[in-house]
Image (cartoon, rainbow, N blue to C red):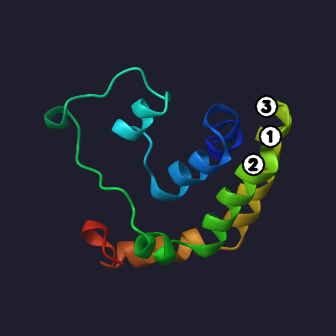
Amino acid sequence: MGGHGAPAGRLVGLGRALDIILTAARGTPVGAAIGLANRVVPPVARAPKPRRSPANIAASPPYSVRSDRRSACESVGLRLPAALRREYTLGAASFNTGEQHRRRQKFASGAGRHGKF
């Protein structure tokens, strides 16, 4: 629903787009290396955010991960307004499953501090 999946495949190709979406590589030197950024902020000026490992991806809310991947795949070849509508539809369906709400409740009760769920 954030609008990041729809244009990503068009900008850098589907394979790289999926890598960026699933591993949270945006905003890193990876983004600059593939042309998504024209500069990278020095490490001392930005908060450390490690790339997500396969284990982190597997621990993510499954419907949300599938929705992001599906949006990127189905948006290839669509005009941007149609791709964004598709991403919104998939994101709304993901939101309506309640999995994000359950994850927020777990976090509020102490789970997930420092990225460990």
The reply to whether callout 1 and callout 2 are in contact (CB within 8 Å) is yes
Residue lying at the far left in this picture: please name it.
44
In the rendered image of this protein, does residue 71 appear above or below residue 106?
above
Element at label 1? helix
Label 1–label 3 contact, CB within 8 A: yes
Using residue 80 as the reference point, say whether residue 36 is left or right of it.
left
Q: Position of residue 44 (x, y in %)?
A: 13, 35
- Please, what is the three-letter code of the amino acid marked with disc 1? Ala
Callout 3, which amino acid? Leu
Q: Which residue is at a point 67% across and 67% down the rendered structure image? A: 66
Residue ID at (70%, 62%) = 67
Which residue lies under the disc numbered 3? 80
Give above or below for 87 relative to 69.
above
The residue tagged 1 is 83
Q: Position of residue 82 (x, y in %)?
A: 86, 37
Which one is nearer the viewer's eye here, 115 or 11? Answer: 11
Residue at 80 percent of width and 53 percent of height: 89
Compare marks 2 and 3 and give the one earlier in the sequence.
Answer: 3
Give residue 3's position: percent from left, percent from top. 65, 40
